[in-house]
C-alpha cells in the first residue's frame, strides 16, 4: 500500500508549483488508464513512462501532494487518482458555458471527455438569433442575451470561448462581468482580463507551427549528415540564367521530393 495518505490542509495546494500543476493531468490520464485495467499499484518509473515525464520529476511532484509511494510496491493507483483529482478540484462538478457554437463550439459540445472529467456543459451560447433553440449535443443553444442569467443560475465559473477572434474580447468581458473567473480561449487572440481571472489558450495552429519548425530542423540535420557522410563533387551549377537577381536560376533549389521549398535548409 502506498504511504503518504495523510490528509494535508487544503491551503497547502497553493504551494504547488505551476509546472507541477500542469503535469498533474498527465499523471491522472495515465493513472485512469491503469485504473480501468484494474492495475492496483504502479512504480514511479512505470507511471513516469506512461505519463511521458521523468521519474525524478514525478517523485518530486508527488511529494507536493504528500504522496511518497512504498519502496518495492510503488503507488496505490486508486488512491493517487483520488488524490490528484482532489488536488485539481475534480471531485466537484464544474458547470461550464461554451460561447460560439459554430464548427468548433459544436465539436466541443459533442466531446464526451468534459462530462467524464467532471465538467458539465451548463449552456451553449451563440449571438446568432437563428441558432437559438437549435439542439447541439442534445442541448438547446441559447442566445447571448441569456448569458448573465445562465451564469448566475448555474454558478458558472468557467467559460469556453469559441467565437471568431474579433468577438472574443467582448465575450470575455461579458463573461468576467457576470462572474466567470476562468476562461478557456480557442479564439486566436490575446485576451486582457482583470487580476484574479485565469485564461488558458488552446491553439492547434501554434502547435502545428512548432512541429513544422522541428520538422524543418530535422530535415536540415538529415541533409547535413548525408552531406558529411558522402563526400561529393562540388554541385554543378547551371549556367547563370538571365533575369534572376544574382544571375542564378532557382530551378536547382528543389526539396527532397522535387518541390521548391519556401526556405531551403541551410
Ligand atoms: N484553438 C484552436 O485550435 C482552433 C481550432 C479551430 C478554430 N479555432 C477558432 O475558434 C473560433 C471558432 O471557429 P469556428 O470554425 O467554429 O467558427 P464558426 O464561424 O463556425 O463559429 C463561430 C460562432 O461564433 C458565433 N459568434 C460570433 N460572435 C459571437 C458573439 N459575440 N457571441 C457569441 N457567439 C458569437 C457565430 O454566430 C458562430 O456560430 C475561431 O476563432 C477560430 O479561429 C481555434
Image: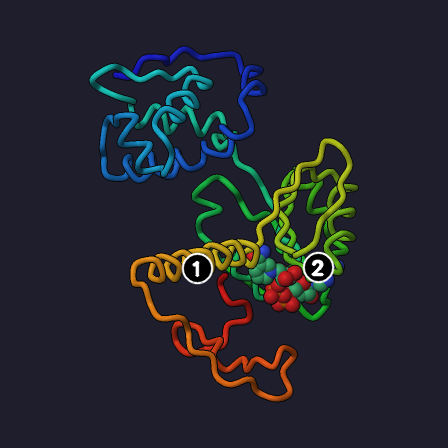
Give percent across and percent down for residue 153: 68, 41
Dot 1 falls on a residue whose secondary structure is helix
- The residue that label 2 is drawn on is 165
Task: Mark yes or no: residue 63 visible.
Answer: yes
- Answer above or below: position of 194 versus 208: above
Marks 1/2: CA distance?
35 Å
Pick whichever, 26 or 82, lies toward us.
26
Which residue is most to the left? 72
For residue 143, what is the image quadrant?
A: bottom right
Q: Which mark is residue 220?
A: 1
Q: Earlier along the polypeptide chain: callout 1 or callout 2?
A: 2
Q: Position of residue 86 (x, y in %)?
A: 47, 26
The one nearer the camera, 223 or 39, is: 223
In the picture, the quarter occupied by the N terminus is: top left
Q: Position of residue 255 (x, y in %)?
A: 44, 73
Cβ of mark 2 under 8 A from ligand 1 = yes
For this view, does 78 lie left or right of residue 126?
left
Q: Residue at x 42, y 20 (%)?
A: 60
Vertical order, 258 against 82 (above or below): below
* Between 252 and 159, the one nearer to me in the picture: 252
**Horizontal side, residue 11 vs residue 230: left or right:** right
Q: Position of residue 179 (x, y in %)?
A: 73, 38
Residue found 61% across the figure and 47% down from its top: 201
Whether residue 101 is visible to the viewer of this picture, yes or no, is no
**View extreme (bottom): residue:** 242
Q: Residue at x 36, y 62 (%)?
A: 227
Q: Secondary structure at mark 2?
A: helix
Amino acid at each position: 500500500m502506498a504511504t503518504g495518505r495523510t490528509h494535508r490542509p487544503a491551503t497547502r495546494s497553493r504551494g504547488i508549483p505551476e509546472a507541477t500543476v500542469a503535469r498533474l493531468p498527465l499523471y491522472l490520464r495515465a493513472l485512469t488508464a491503469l485504473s480501468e485495467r484494474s492495475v492496483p499499484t504502479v512504480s514511479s518509473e512505470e507511471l513516469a513512462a506512461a505519463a511521458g515525464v521523468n521519474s525524478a520529476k514525478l517523485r518530486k511532484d508527488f511529494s507536493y501532494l504528500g504522496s511518497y509511494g512504498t519502496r518495492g510496491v510503488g503507488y496505490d493507483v486508486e488512491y493517487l487518482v483520488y488524490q490528484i483529482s482532489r488536488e485539481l478540484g475534480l471531485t466537484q462538478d464544474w458547470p461550464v458555458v461554451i460561447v460560439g457554437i459554430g464548427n468548433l463550439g459544436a465539436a466541443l459540445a459533442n466531446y464526451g471527455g468534459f462530462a467524464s472529467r467532471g465538467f458539465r456543459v451548463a449552456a451553449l451560447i451563440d449571438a446568432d438569433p437563428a441558432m437559438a433553440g437549435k439542439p447541439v449535443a442534445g442541448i438547446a443553444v441559447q442566445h447571448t442575451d441569456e448569458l448573465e442569467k445562465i451564469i448566475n443560475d448555474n454558478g458558472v465559473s468557467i467559460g469556453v470561448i469559441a467565437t471568431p477572434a474579433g468577438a472574443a474580447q467582448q465575450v470575455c468581458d461579458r463573461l468576467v462581468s457576470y462572474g466567470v473567473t476562468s476562461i478557456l480561449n480557442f479564439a486566436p487572440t490575446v485576451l486582457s482580463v482583470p487580476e484574479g481571472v485565469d485564461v488558458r489558450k488552446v491553439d492547434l495552429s501554434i502547435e502545428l507551427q512548432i512541429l513544422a519548425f522541428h520538422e524543418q530542423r530535422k530535415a536540415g540535420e538529415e541533409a547535413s549528415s548525408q552531406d558529411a557522410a558522402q563526400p561529393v563533387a562540388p554541385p554543378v551549377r547551371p549556367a547563370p540564367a538571365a533575369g534572376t537577381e544574382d544571375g542564378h536560376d532557382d530551378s536547382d533549389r528543389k526539396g527532397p521530393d522535387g518541390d521548391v521549398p519556401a526556405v531551403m535548409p541551410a
